[in-house]
Image (cartoon, rainbow, N blue to C red):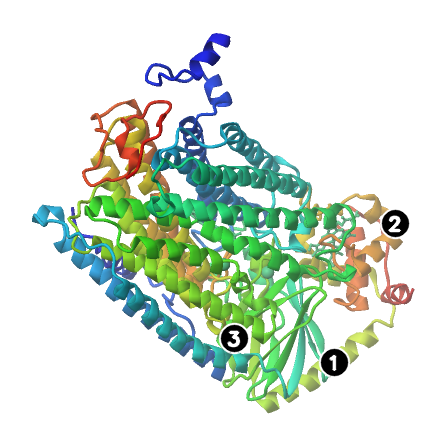
Amino acid sequence: MNAQATDLYHDDHDHHGPPPGLWRWVVTTNHKDIGTLYLWFSLIMFFIGGAMALVIRTELFQPGLQVVDPHFFNQMTTLHALVMIFGVVMPAFVGLANWMLPMMVGAPDMALPRMNNWSFWILPFGFGLMLSTLFMEGGGPSAGWTLYPPLSLQTGDALPFLIFSIHLLGVSSIMGAINIIATIMNLRAPGMTFMKMPLFVWTWFITAYLLIAVMPVLAGAVTMMLTDKYFGTSFFNAAGGGDPVMFQHIFWFFGHPEVYILILPSFGLVSEIIPTFSRKKLFGYSSMVYATASIAFLSFIVWAHHMFTVGMPLAGELFFMFTTMLIAVPTGVKVFNWVSTMWKGAMTFETPMLFALGFVIMFTIGGFSGLMLAMTPIDFQYHDTYFVVAHFHYVLVPGAIFGIIAGVYYWLPKWTGNYYDETLGKVHFWLSTIFVNILFFPMHFVGLAGMPRRIPDYSVQFTDFNQIATIGAFGFGFAQILFLVLIVKCIRGGEKATDQVWEGAEGLEWTVASPPPYHTFSPQPIVK
Amino acid sequence: MKNIRRIPIVLLGLVLWAASFPAAADWQLNLTEGVTEISREVYDMHMFVLWICVAIGVIVFGAMAYSIFYHRKSKGVTPATFHESTTAELIWTIIPFLILVAMAIPAAKTLIVMEDTSDADITIKVTGHQWKWEYEYLESGIRFISNLHADSREAATLGSGIDPSSVENYLLEVDKPVVLPVGKKVRILLTASDVIHAWWLPAIAVKKDAIPGFINEMWTKIDEVGIYRGQCAELCGRDHGFMPIVVDARSESDYNDWVTAELAAAEAAASSADREWEMDELMERGEGVYATYCVACHQGNGEGIPGIFPSLVGTPMALEDIEGHVDIVLNGKEGTAMQAFANQLNDADLAAVITYERNAWGNDTGDVIQPSTIRSMKVQ
Ligand code: HEM
Ligand SMILES: [Cu+2]
Ligand SMILES: [Cu+2]
């Protein structure tokens, strides 16, 4: 033990690695190990959440009830969303941050390594609690991921489990966010000023503040729900002087910044990748930073656009409509800057670039439907229909998820020291892109034609588009198996990657070896 | 590598493939224009915004496609070095802002009209229950509950084997639609008894939440006689997908005839509760009431769903405790999905369904509960 401890703190980082065996992963405080844990966790959860989505899509293949009871269907939509949001997208971002932030700012590790270990290891327990409810009598939570009372108060024994698991996930996210902020504030290499930081670092920096601001709000809301259910309070019960709509306000005060938590780091990823493969600097760096900050600020004052139908006063509806429309401005700036970065570049189309381009196009499509939803009078027609499901899946799947996948492809050679199989990567991209559109585009149509969301069965005129969507869902799901295969292949071997990896890449992470030594950057590099 | 213009190709593929399907359904792609002035305004605004999005999309994706095509390394280009321009940033901040203002102004105007519920000709109150709608006409006092139609209910049971396309208006048909007059401003008050529901009728572009303990308001003025269908639009539990809304819009004189007939029927129902009822009669009626009002939770065989909805078969309450049984059906149980039926069903229906529960599925207690008993227990 003693010998090992001295070894761990030994300066000669080329010669020592982690402690051997599986125990390494339990006790590790190394940012790369923890990053790896987060990323694998996220991938596993992606398949679990995806399997739930396929249960939903299977039931929706035809009108009538064929495979699941409506009660179970509702559990699937609820858990699918919670798993995808808290178990896939957020951990994947934290995993990428763990791996890359220290390397991008020239730090030896994250600022708070032990807390880092904690914030990962809470996650499996949090999700263990949440998913265990599926096996309880009465089943898992079924009131939708938005958990609106009074419906959520009808949940059986699953409710306290769900609430405690949300507390755990919140603690984990907050610790992760504190760590990221501490790292960026304190461990930047000499010369790495704020306005020289790569955009992925910037977007995560801002995201971390959003997390710290809103995760406690969610924790508060669900705790009030817990006391309403078990300790006789009436926060959300009109009969006791409370207000069910208050929950929605609190929830969406968390929820809207949350949706930006789910997209800002992907903005950062794409802003790294497009310049590399365009062989041209990012256009409008500082306006990208300001746009991100404005989006983050605006995200706090638009929450009630999710609640236009609750019967707000006219003034409230107008206010939230105007602020929401305003978000389109900084978002547009980002898209225009990405396109200008490509303009007159010398582009190549390796897999990370393909996913990044897919991101720009399909995220923009999701942005368009978002703009439509912002208009209160027409939102009355769209609200709670499949049009909304199409909208948020466009920003989340070919948005957030494509950003993450692009990031993984971009840095996989750096992490493993091997190039991945480019052909397989391209096949993965094309299959994902084709199927994701077959999956989600028709949802716009059925939504406009009047199909509500969160229903296990529908009237027959919606059949055809639903069948198309289901086929797309299975295609998309199976295409992701290629991703898994590709990653495993790449870890096992392949063409050796150079340190530079990509011809056009710039930044500190490309100055270290591929794969990087267990401890990067001590002493710190100097940025000119 | 092919270029990135795959979206149109995918879409084209979708459309071609769609066309090869048997014409089982109408491939409705777009929002309905509806049958009110407001719904047409909403439709126009929807199309306006859609075209703006398409135009912006053409510019942005067009520039991308051009650049992807011509600014690629394989064409031997050397990358330019420009990477900022304050002018460009200002242009694409200010122009989108102006477009947004152009969109916001008509939207605000329409919204103001939509929220103005004053000067209504008639007022109806809509109450959402798990999982049916109750309608009350405040002027005439007509009150009834509108349930999913029995044919749809039967077909929409897991493993029913009934083909939904053989059911007329599958999931969009009710046992009793709301009747409204055309050409009159109707104010709709919304509330709920248990959880939040949302009342949505696409043809009139009106959707609002029905929230327990609160009353929301909205209005409509329908132009054309016809039957219009919608659904609950807020997740409200297991059968959220099974509480449709059907509005039967009639001419003013047809509407008045309907009101007269309804009032007469209500009178007749009230007097029928005064007489003694036979067991058979109660059982028959009770079976129907059960199938409409209770089956969604307690299930056709009375056994409920373990852990969520209790069984009524062979339980102490169903076999012995008559008072408890009547009490829970009349008053429901606070904080659970079991709602108070005292105001949803009339005395004869209540007596019938309780009698039915005490004698069906082998519960053969032989108890007969009379409407008059219910009436006296209600008073207590
Ligand atoms: C892998 C492919 C995916 C498929 C096939 C899929 C499919 C679906 C379907 C069919 C629904 C149910 C809609 C309804 O009944 O109302 C749904 C809901 C939802 N999905 Fe996905 N989804 C996928 C990925 C994702 C991802 C990656 C995220 C988030 C990052 C996500 C977030 C959500 C959310 C928030 C809901 C709403 C749940 C609710 O109504 O409470 N989905 N998804
Ligand atoms: Cu929002
Ligand atoms: Cu509902």
Q: Chain of mark 1?
A: B
Residue A474 shows up from this direction: no
| Residue that lies at the very extreme toward the bottom in this rendered image | B253
**Mark 3 or 2, nearer chain start:** 3
| Mark seen at residue A480 | none
Q: Which residue is mark 3?
A: B228
Residue drawn at (40%, 78%), measured in percent from left and top?
B44
- Mark 3 is surrounded, within 10 Å at the Cα level, by few (under 14), some (14 to 19) or many (20 or more) other residues, namely some
Query: Circles 1 and 2: CB distance less than 8 Å?
Result: no
Tell which of B163 and A267 is nearer to you.
Answer: A267
Is A429 on the left-hand or right-hand side of A137?
A: left
How far apart are the two marked residues, 1 and 2, measured between alpha carbons?
A: 35 Å
How far apart are the two marked residues, 1 and 3, measured between alpha carbons?
A: 23 Å
> Quick check: do tags 1 and 2 share a chain?
yes
Q: Which residue is mark 1?
A: B141
Q: Chain of mark 2?
A: B
Question: What is the quadrant of residue A101 in the picture?
Answer: top left
Q: Which residue is mark 2?
A: B321
Residue A25, percent across and down?
A: 47, 22
**Mark 1 or 3, nearer chain start:** 1
Amino acid under label 3?
Answer: Tyr
Q: Chain of mark 3?
A: B
- Mark 2 is surrounded, within 10 Å at the Cα level, by few (under 14), some (14 to 19) or many (20 or more) other residues, namely few
Is B327 on the left-hand or right-hand side of A86?
A: right
Residue drawn at (61%, 79%), measured in percent from left and top?
B179
Tell which of A392 and B344 is nearer to you.
Answer: A392
Nearer mark to the viewer, of 3 and 2 = 3
Residue A436 shows up from this direction: yes
Is A192 on the left-hand or right-hand side of B85?
A: right
